[in-house]
């Protein structure tokens, strides 16, 4: 190397290491993912309660899920319990694992710090249950995430919708639009879901479960 080349070499910025995470990725402590289906025809359905809940949580922090990555809309919130990415996958419900695994990998967040919010027919209407792991009870969104991550060891916030009455089939019950009155009755539920998520992040699952797994 010539003397002139060596002189310029001293002022050349060091190449960034590709092994170091970006500042954006390294600051994220949690992932909060709501389950649902994209498209206006599903926006008001019971199967989209997860979407509704994460939008409400984002609104607490004056955020909207408008950024897009890995087939999902997302935003970042800053809380006293740490920073979290809130996600709505834009694959269909039973392919939610594609987005979940890609986002976790990109932000270097372990699966045990993923909180998935979803509807649950095996619970009474508007009742919450918090749990980690376990079977998917036929929920294909939960199953997709467990398969994509290779483990069911993530946290779930389940919103009870009960089983359909009469002769109505499960699919019609899950996908039919809710009325304005039905949506209004869910407003306190979404607030409670947001409280539960923040309690998990701040105090841990066991303590949060003792508060939010009670019948209200």
Image (tube, rainbow, N blue to C red):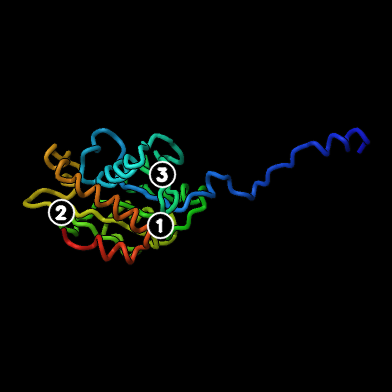
| Pointer 1 residue | 147
Q: Which of the numbered marks, if any, corresponds to residue 125?
A: 2
Question: Closer to the camera: disc 3 or disc 1?
Answer: 3
Could one spot residue 113 in this view of the protein? yes
Structural distance between the alpha carbons of marks 2 and 3: 29 Å
- What residue appears at the point 20 percent right and 55 percent down from the top-left corner? 160
Q: Nearer the viewer, residue 15 or 77?
A: 77
- What residue appears at the point 6 percent right and 52 percent down from the top-left corner? 166
| Pointer 3 residue | 77
- What residue appears at the point 43 percent right and 35 percent down from the top-left corner? 67
- What residue appears at the point 40 percent right and 49 percent down from the top-left corner? 79
Estimate the x, y position of residue 9 in percent, counting from the top left. Answer: 83, 38
- Crowding at dot 2, Cα within 10 Å, few <14 / some 14-19 / many 20+, comes out as some
Tag 2, which secondary structure?
Answer: loop
Could one spot residue 98 in this view of the protein? no
Q: Which of the numbered marks, if any, corresponds to residue 4?
A: none
Q: Quadrant of residue 201?
A: bottom left
Estimate the x, y position of residue 186 in percent, counting from the top left. Answer: 18, 46
């Amino acid at each position: 190397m010539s003397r002139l080349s060596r002189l310029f070499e001293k002022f050349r910025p060091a190449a960034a290491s590709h092994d170091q995470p970006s500042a954006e990725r390294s600051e994220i402590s949690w992932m909060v993912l709501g389950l649902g289906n994209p498209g206006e025809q599903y926006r008001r359905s019971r199967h989209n309660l997860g979407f509704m809940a994460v939008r409400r949580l984002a609104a607490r922090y004056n955020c909207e899920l408008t950024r897009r990555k890995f087939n999902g809309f997302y935003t970042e919130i800053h809380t006293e319990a740490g920073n979290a990415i809130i996600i709505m996958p834009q694959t269909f419900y039973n392919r939610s694992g594609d987005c979940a695994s890609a986002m976790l990998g990109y932000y270097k967040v372990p699966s045990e710090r993923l909180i998935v919010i979803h509807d649950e027919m095996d619970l009474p209407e508007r009742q919450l249950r918090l749990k980690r792991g376990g079977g998917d009870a036929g929920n294909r969104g939960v199953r997709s995430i467990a398969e994509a991550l290779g483990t069911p060891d993530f946290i779930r916030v389940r919103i009870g919708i009960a089983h359909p009455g009469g002769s109505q089939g499960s699919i019609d019950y899950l996908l039919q639009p809710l009325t304005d009155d039905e949506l209004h009755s869910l407003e306190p539920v979404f607030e409670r879901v947001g409280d539960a998520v923040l309690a998990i992040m701040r105090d841990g699952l066991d303590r949060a479960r003792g508060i939010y797994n009670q019948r209200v």
